Each structure stands twice: as structure tokens, then as C-alpha cells.
Amino acid sequence: DAKTTQPPSMDCAEGRAANLPCNHSTISGNEYVYWYRQIHSQGPQYIIHGLKNNETNEMASLIITEDRKSSTLILPHATLRDTAVYYCIVRPVISNFGNEKLTFGTGTRLTIIP
Amino acid sequence: KAGVTQTPRYLIKTRGQQVTLSCSPISGHRSVSWYQQTPGQGLQFLFEYFSETQRNKGNFPGRFSGRQFSNSRSEMNVSTLELGDSALYLCASSSRGRGEEAFFGQGTRLTVV
């Protein structure tokens, strides 16, 4: 699986957009970019994933660069409840016998400041 | 629909003992994966089960084992517990092969004393 690099920590003011970067320069053509977050002492929570197009759902937007070597997760209006560790993960496109393993890095600890 | 359920939530065991943790996946999900989370090593993949067969395994000693039942429920077992096995053990379920996200349970916090 491709390796990802994320800043260890970031702060964001409540109500502002939080932009979390991820570098995945060794990503291959059949790998998706996934984002999960983990609020203290809870299980990781899925946020969003994408292959090469930008994606948006009710939680966040995912912007993937054209060369797919980096991406940015955007939380449009951060709240205190968004304080968590955010993990960027790349994994192969799933086939019926594909690899379900998620390789978590150290993630970014995002703190939302009141 | 109900989420992933892990039992028990908390457990205290003594070195040398063994422990069994349980995971009930989301209804219809046939893939169950297990992860260990410690402050030093972070989140690490243990193994994945699908249709009662182990499909993938992480880099853990043979003291860590698991199984999956015909109803997709899974158990993991750790024998001869060591202090370093103290961790949050997380279970995730997914609809394998459909590119869907994995859903995690709240975890079982194991403390070995």
C-alpha cells in the first residue's frame, strides 16, 4: 500500500474551514484515497473517499490533485465536535477478493479552537 | 441499522491468562477485520475474516488468533497475555468486494496487569 504523509497537528478556529493535507506521492493508479477520523477513545469513523475526482458528502469535501500525489480534506464549517485525529489512507480498488486491510499512519490531530 | 458491536467494552486480565473478544458486524456485512491500537504503535491491522476464512493477516505473533462464525460474528483470542498486549482492540465490518467503507465498533479496552 502507498505511504501517506500528514502534518502531526493543526488548529482551526470554530466556524472556519479546516483544510487537512495529505501527501501520497507513491499512489498507484488502482488505489483510492480514504479519510477516517477518530474522536478520543472511539472507533475510527469513515468520512469520505475518492479515486481521482473531487468528492463531497454531508461531512466533508475531498480535493485530489490532478497527478493524484496529494489531497486535501475540507471540513467546511468546523465545530468543536470535529476535534479528532484524521487519518488519510490509500488502498487498492476493492475486488471480490481484494484487500480489506487499512494501513493507518499517525494522522493529523485537529483541534478546533472556540 | 445497528452498528458494529464489540463486547466486552472493558477487560482487565493478568499476565499469562488468555482472553476472547467478540465482534458482531453490521447485518449483511460478511467481512470482519481486527485492529490493535496502542499509544506507541498506533492502529495496526491484526487480521481479516470473510466467509469464515482468514483472508489477510498482519504482523502479530501466533498468540493472536481469530475465527468467524457462519453468521459473520467474529471472535479474537489472545493467549499467554503480556503487559504489552494492553490496548484498544477494534473490530471493523464491511461489505467485501464492493468498495464500501469499513465501519468500526467502539472497541474493547484490554488492560493486562
Image (cartoon, coloured by chain):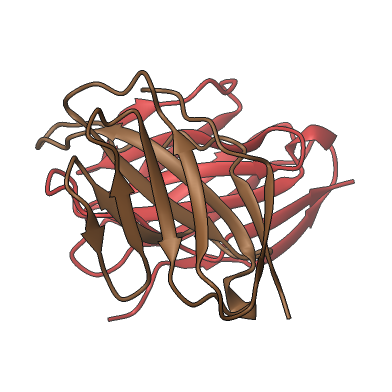
- Which chain corresponds to the colour brown? A
On screen, B41 above or below B9?
above
In the picture, measured across the screen, residue A99 lies left or right of residue A11, that is: left
Would residue B59 be seen by someone viewing this image from the given angle?
A: yes
Residue B82 seen in the figure? no
Which residue is at the front of the view, B101 or A35? Answer: A35
The chain drawn in red is B
Q: Which of the 4 image quarters holds residue B52?
A: top left
Q: Quadrant of the C terminus of chain A?
A: bottom right
Residue found 71% across the figure and 46% down from its top: B87
Identified at 41% across, 48% down, the residue is A72
Residue B79 percent coordinates (x, y): 66, 34
In the picture, residue B44 is in which quadrant?
A: top right
x then y, percent, for residue A38: 57, 59
- Residue at image x 38%, y 61%? A47
Q: Return the residue nearer the eye: A48 or B11.
A: A48
Tell me which residue sits at (18%, 31%) in the image: A98
* Residue A106 x, y percent position in the rendering: 62, 38
Q: Between residues A77 and A86, which one lies in front from this camera angle?
A: A77
A73 sits left or right of A67 in the view? right
Q: Is residue A11 left or right of residue B33?
A: right
* Along the line of sight, the residue nearer the viewer: A87 or B75: A87
Query: Is A48 situated above or below B58?
Result: below
In the picture as drawn, the residue positioned furthest to the right comes out as B113
Which quadrant does the N terminus of chain A fall into?
top left
**Residue B18: image location, x then y, percent:** 69, 41
Q: How many marks?
A: 0
